[in-house]
Amino acid sequence: MGDAQRLSPDEQIRSAKEAFENGRDLTVAVEEEFAILDPETLGLVNRFEELEAAARGSDLEEHLVGELIASEIEVRTGRCETFAEAAALMGERRRQLLELAARFDVALCAAGTHPWSPWQEQRIIDTPHYRRNDEVLRYVVWRNNSFGLHVHVGIRGADRAIAVTSGLRAFLPHLLAYSGSSPFVEGVYTHLHSARTQIFTRMFPRCGVPDAFADWDEYERYVRFLYDTGSITEHTQLWWSVRPHLAFPTVEIRICDGQPELGEAQALAALMFGLTARIARALDEGEPLPDHPHRLIEENFWRAIRHGLSGELIDLDSGEVRPARAELERLLEWVLPVAEELGVAPFLTVPAITPSERQMARHEAGESMEAVYAQEVLEPARLVTPK
């Protein structure tokens, strides 16, 4: 990504289009963000730089990066040729990160928000990228103490990447409802299944559900407009919940909350990858895809934020309102044939309970948010994928 940031906008856009035209189809990479915690209080602690320095020279070094605040750390699988490889590396990266954290007496958690640590006490890491974002966004970026799971899927063809991105728009609420893990923030039980999404997508510019673009040329004109008007200074300032990435020939899905359990993270990433592959197959075979206006997708987006899989989603083709789990089951049925071809099917599941549902149930049964959060903290015993 560093090389892409050093290119001029013209060079970057030309390079990105060429990379997509010559890219590898259906590679996959997963990125997971973790809170860095005091092991006794479980409050956020600003220890990223120490962990980063200690990882230098190790197998983890090239897969560990900073993410905005010094109380957050991100690990990446790197590009994988199959989802099974990515799933295995997700477990390995968590294990490596836990071993590193143990050396510095810190704990880790991948829930979408921290329940009580004040954003005012979190320090932004000192990199050119995050200094720029701090200068541009100020309060907006200060408030964004959140932890997500992102999946990159390789897509060959610039126009095809735009079409896949547009095809994913209608399904972003389904992925968000599946992933909800952040009902607590700033000491408040929000009753939202994804307070992270409300904080991030409702505050950041160029965020949430993007417009649909007809092809690469239309997308390129928009990106050039943003650069030409000084609206952005680097391509990562398009913070949409799904986007074609200009540093890698991938479509990146960014809508999901982090997942406390490894099995939950693998199952969610499998759905994100399988769905993207299914949409690419539909485009290749001329199968119609949903093409709904932003205002309708936003209705489901809010339902996913507020109620997760416990609520209902709208079938935007018929207008029928259905249980969110039933809509997810229908989606999995549609994805399954391609998922079986790609070896993803064993990871796909409709969860009996999501992280947000689990946390809400415990809290409503009388547990404090501190006690609830403590049960979500990453431990070595939880680095086993359920059979």
Image (cartoon, rainbow, N blue to C red):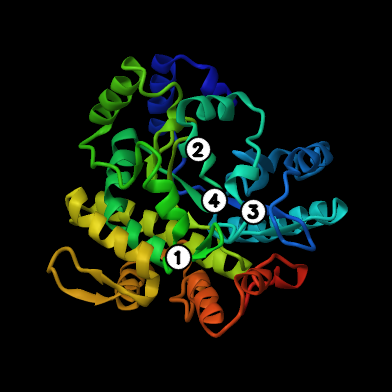
Residue at position x 66%, y 56% in the image: 89
Residue 286 makes an appearance in the image: yes
Disc 4 residue type (three-letter): Ser
Where is residue 306, by image quadrant?
bottom left
- Could you say whether the residue bearing mark 3 is in a helix, strand or loop? strand
Residue closer to the observer: 371 or 298: 371
Q: Where in the figure is residue 32, as x and y percent of width and height?
A: 59, 52
| Amino acid tagged 1 | Thr
Query: Foreground mark, 4 or 3?
Result: 4
Q: Label 3 vs label 1: CA separation? A: 21 Å
Rendered image: mark on residue 146: 4
Q: Secondary structure at mark 4?
A: loop
Distance between the alpha carbons at the discs numbered 4 and 1: 15 Å
Looking at the rendered image, the disc whose residue lies closer to the viewer, 3 or 1, is 1
Three-letter code, disc 2:
Val
Q: Which residue bears the numbered disc 1? A: 190
